[in-house]
Amino acid sequence: MDTMIETRGLTKEFRSGKKTVTAVKDLDLHIATGEMVALLGPNGAGKSTALRMLTTLLAPTSGSAYVAGYDVTSDQHAVRRAIGYIGQGNSAGHAQRVNDELVASGRAYGLSRAGSRARADELLESLGLTEQATQKVMTLSGGQRRRLDIAMGLIHSPGLLFLDEPSTGLDPQNRANLQQHVVDLRRKHGATVVLTTHYLEEADSLAERIVVIDHGQVVADDSPAALKSRHAGDRIALTFAGPDEAARAAQRAAAAHPAAQVVQDGTAVDVQVAGGAAMVTGFLADLASSGLAPATVEVARPTLDDVFLALTGRSLREGRTDIRTDARTDITEEVAA
Ligand SMILES: Nc1ncnc2c1ncn2[C@@H]1O[C@H](COP(=O)(O)OP(=O)(O)O)[C@@H](O)[C@H]1O
Ligand SMILES: [Mg+2]
């Protein structure tokens, strides 16, 4: 397969006063033509910064990046012509009419007036915005607005599309619609798609390949299925009558299974461990010997959040407390998610 994106040691540092933040560190990325890749990571991981370098909006501090065969540093115009970019901010002007804004954007990419109009009509139709075509951008709902952003990024039928958190701010219905459009448009145009997200389910369902990023660095890069089978064990999910019982059970589980990831959230306790399904009986007997009886017990296959937890010791979901026990020093640390 052809190479669409190739980065080597791509790094971005931000300096404010004496402080230096390394937003992206030594990113080596190889993305083939036609791939659909999700960059997954928590807020502040460096996803947007990586995308902004690949789309020439930010200059790298060091390292190199080739996008569609062009150097992002020395050949910015060629890169921009080759890509569509749907950023986190809104790209359309508020007082403009939807249709005009879209046609103008096509013209800016070098389409003829007639060609740009035809393409705008086609996109408005396929994104369910035909009825809004003559409305001003500021009158659109959040979901319509986001779909207009998508149309803006697709007006010139880019072979390579970057989407930065495309679903953020959308309700579940519109999120599903948008995801379907991305899948369809990719099928029709055979485009390469790189998206960022902190929605685990979105990454799991949309992407064939997931690059997990944390603190500006790649911590894993594989298909969702391979990541799950390699990095996360089965999960035993328990609930207890009260948080005190849950806390005792969590401590007990961490002590009995040093290799396990143990997470307590209120009355819920999750124990993540390789071969966990086979351990359930013994585990419950151990709890019972301490006078702890769970109200419910469930055994589940790993999710991408489990993968992230296994790789970083933190959860991508908010409001969870991760309790890890270091077997050698017997220190229990609590890490706020
Ligand atoms: N323009 C900027 N100036 C200074 N720091 C920045 C700037 N943009 C991003 N950062 C910092 O870089 C890190 C990565 O940010 P970002 O790429 O936006 O992460 P993500 O998109 O994964 O949430 C964060 O620590 C953020 O505060
Ligand atoms: Mg971001």
Image (cartoon, rainbow, N blue to C red):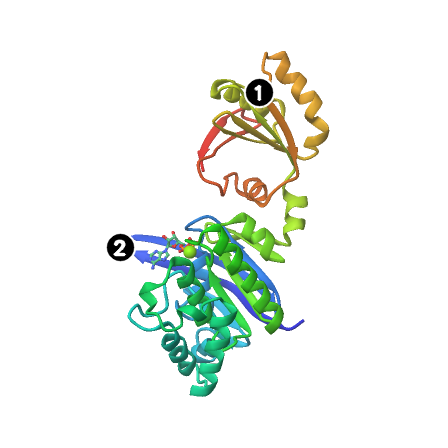
Q: Write down the residue under mark 1.
A: 252
Residue 289 visible here? yes
The kind of residue tagged 2 is Gly
Q: Cα distance, mark 2 to mark 1?
A: 47 Å
Amino acid identity at mark 1: Arg
Mark nearer the N terminus (2 vs 1): 2
Viewer-nearest of labels 2 and 1?
1
Give the residue drawn at x 59%, y 73%: 189
Q: Is residue 45 shown left or right of residue 262?
A: left
Which residue is at the far front? Answer: 131
**Number of numbered callouts drawn:** 2
x and y percent of residue 254 in the render? 57, 25
Is any atom of residue 33 visible in this view? no
Residue found at the very far left of the displayed protein = 17
Q: Is residue 236 above or below residue 60?
A: above
Quadrant for the N terminus, please.
bottom right
Q: Quadrant of the C terminus?
A: top left
Classify mark 2: helix, strand or loop: loop
Residue 53, above or below 304: below
What SS does tag 1 mark? helix
- The residue most toward the right is 278
Ligand 1 sits in quadrant: bottom left
Whether pointer 2 and pointer 1 mark residues with C-beta atoms closer than 8 Å, the reply is: no
| 278 left or right, relative to 126 | right
In this rendering, is residue 324 above or below 90? above
How far from the left and from the top, in percent, is residue 169?
A: 41, 53
Residue closer to the observer: 130 or 292: 130
- Label 2: which residue? 17
Q: Residues within 10 Å of mark 1 (few under 14, many from 20)?
A: some
| Mark 2 closeness class: few <14, some 14–19, many ≥20 residues within 10 Å | few
